Image (cartoon, grey):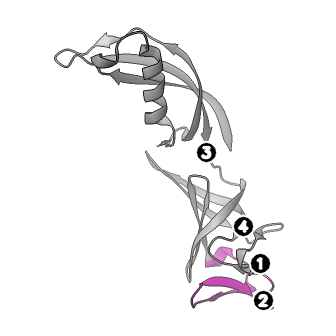
Amino acid sequence: MFFHITLERNMQLHPRHFGPHLRDKLVAKLMKDVEGTCSGRHGFVVAITGVEDIGKGLIREGTGFVTFPVKYQAVVFRPFKGEILEAVVTMVNKMGFFAEAGPVQIFVSNHLIPDDMEFQSGDVPNYTTSDGSVKIQKDSEVRLKIIGTRVDATEIFCIGTIKDDFLGVINDPGAAA
């Protein structure tokens, strides 16, 4: 799920950046440092939408660096248990498959794949239905449901299932060939 929230961060800036473009340098450094990162509390920072406030700088003794408190708004992505996501399969093996939905990696165990799908090893490992009509392989698009998440300080891991109504393959790249 995506959220638009207000965050705060202390930014350190070298004295060579001081001058008429100080604010621009701070915002550029904030975007470079924060966008694409993950905090366990808020999720993945997708984009910074605006800077609300830049506080007064505090000079760090001995280094000359100045620390500025910056308050900014950002769009964050945080998956929740029970959420339905569309993801792209990145790896298939006999234990299940891994898929990515944006920055989140989701593992779907073979126990959470419908019973009529069997693992097929070979050049392109995949899960195929007994009649061969549905195939899950690398680069397939699947709709899955998150049944569990584990949050670390810098990463979020998810477990998903496609063993439910309206879940499974959306787009199969192998069908076009």
How far across and how far down the image is residue 94, in percent? 56, 83
Quick one: label 1, few (<14), some, or many (20+) residues within 10 Å? Answer: few
In primary-sequence order, the first of circles 3 and 4 is: 3
Q: Please, what secondary structure does the residue beneath circle 3 have?
A: loop
Which residue position holds label 1?
Answer: 176
How far across and how far down the image is residue 2, in percent? 67, 40
Q: CA distance from mark 2 to mark 3?
A: 35 Å
Which residue position holds label 4?
Answer: 142
Q: Please, what secondary structure does the residue beneath circle 2 have?
A: loop
In primary-sequence order, the first of circles 2 and 3 is: 3
114 within the magenta span: yes
Quick one: label 2, few (<14), some, or many (20+) residues within 10 Å? Answer: few
Which residue position holds label 3?
Answer: 78
Q: Residue lying farthest left?
A: 62
How far across and how far down the image is residue 43, in percent? 55, 42
Q: Residue lying farthest front?
A: 20
**Which of the pair 58/17 is nearer the observer?**
17
In primary-sequence order, the first of circles 1 and 4 is: 4
Q: Amino acid at mark 1?
A: Ala
100 sits to left or right of 14: right
Q: Amino acid at mark 4?
A: Val
Where does the C terminus fall, quadrant-wise? bottom right
Please tell me the numbered disc located at residue 132: 2
Q: Please, what secondary structure does the residue beneath circle 1 have?
A: helix
